[in-house]
């Protein structure tokens, strides 16, 4: 395979929302799911989010457990996986937490239409990869990441990036934790937003497992249809 193994990991409300209508993060899962996600981060080569997630949540995307970081170091790896932001217009703030916290490589993926002065400033903080004309070309980016030795990639949202990766046929598995709350709101982001699929394009999933965790449920899916659309 000329791209990494890719899986999306996400927490959503019982009505499929990732955050509120004001895009404010809500605590959806508890400590056990937090530990599960931290373990996933510790096992993978890279983690990827979209610029919308960075602007609304400012995540550091680091491995939180000292023991897991130490285990990565002992295995000859950086404490944290490679952290990637998909940012077509180079809008990533220079004071984002991803630059402040944790060691390890950071990558900003931009399009060729991103402003040169913004790219220059980001290049002082991260490796900038140009792919695509107006928007980041996700299939091209995936190939470039594989060439860099990234074999496992976790996507942590948001809704637009989830859509982009799925619509490009780049996702192998999906892990969704569904919490015991209703958020509502026609404009609140769901697991997959973007343009949406037509009836003939809808990808099918195969349920691998369903596990009750605290007051929610973790569903693991395999994506059956991986053809690019």
Image (tube, rainbow, N blue to C red):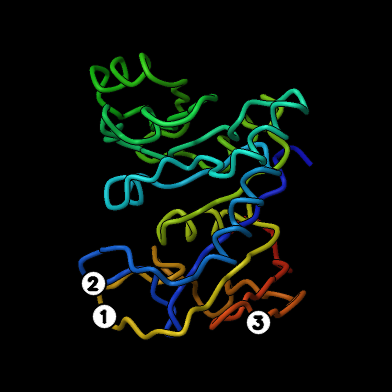
Q: CA distance from mark 1 to mark 2?
A: 7 Å
- Dot in front, 3 or 2: 3
Q: Do tag 1 and tag 2 residues touch (Cβ < 8 Å)?
A: yes
Q: Which residue is mark 1?
A: 186
Q: Is residue 109 above or below residue 116?
A: below
Tell me the number on the disc at residue 21.
Answer: 2
Q: Which residue is mark 3?
A: 212
Measured Cα–Cα span from mark 3 to mark 2: 27 Å
Q: Which residue sits furthest left?
A: 22
49 relative to 142 in the view: left or right: left
In the image, 70 versus 120, the foreground residue is: 70
Instruction: Give coordinates of residue 225: x percent, y percent.
Output: 70, 66
Residue 66 horizontal/vertical position (percent)? 60, 38
Q: Residue at x 69, y 26 (%)?
A: 73
Q: Earlier in the sequence, mark 3 or mark 2?
A: 2
Q: Nearer the viewer, residue 210 or 130?
A: 210
The secondary element bearing badge 1 is classed as loop
Report the Cα–Cα distance between label 3 and label 1: 28 Å
Q: Tag on residue 95?
A: none
């Amino acid at each position: 395979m000329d791209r990494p193994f890719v899986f999306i990991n996400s927490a959503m409300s019982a009505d499929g929302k990732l955050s509120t209508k004001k895009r404010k993060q809500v605590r959806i899962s508890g400590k056990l799911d937090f530990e599960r996600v931290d373990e996933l981060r510790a096992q993978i080569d890279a983690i990827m989010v979209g610029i919308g997630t960075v602007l609304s949540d400012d995540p550091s995307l680091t491995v939180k457990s000292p023991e897991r970081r130490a285990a990565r170091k002992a295995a000859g790896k950086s404490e944290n996986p490679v952290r990637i932001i998909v940012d077509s217009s180079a809008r990533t703030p220079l004071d984002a937490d991803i630059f402040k916290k944790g060691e390890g490589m950071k990558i900003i993926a931009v399009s060729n239409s991103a402003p040169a002065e913004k790219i220059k400033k980001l290049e002082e903080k991260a490796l900038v990869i140009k792919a695509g004309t107006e928007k980041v070309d996700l299939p091209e980016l995936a190939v470039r990441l594989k060439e860099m030795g990234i074999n496992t990639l976790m996507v942590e949202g948001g809704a637009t990036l989830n859509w982009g990766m799925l619509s490009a046929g780049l996702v192998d598995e999906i892990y969704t934790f569904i919490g015991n709350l209703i958020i509502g709101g026609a404009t609140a982001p769901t697991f997959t937003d973007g343009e949406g699929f037509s009836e003939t394009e809808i990808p099918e999933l195969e349920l691998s497992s369903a596990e009750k965790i605290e007051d929610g449920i973790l569903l693991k899916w395999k994506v059956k249809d991986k053809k690019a659309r």
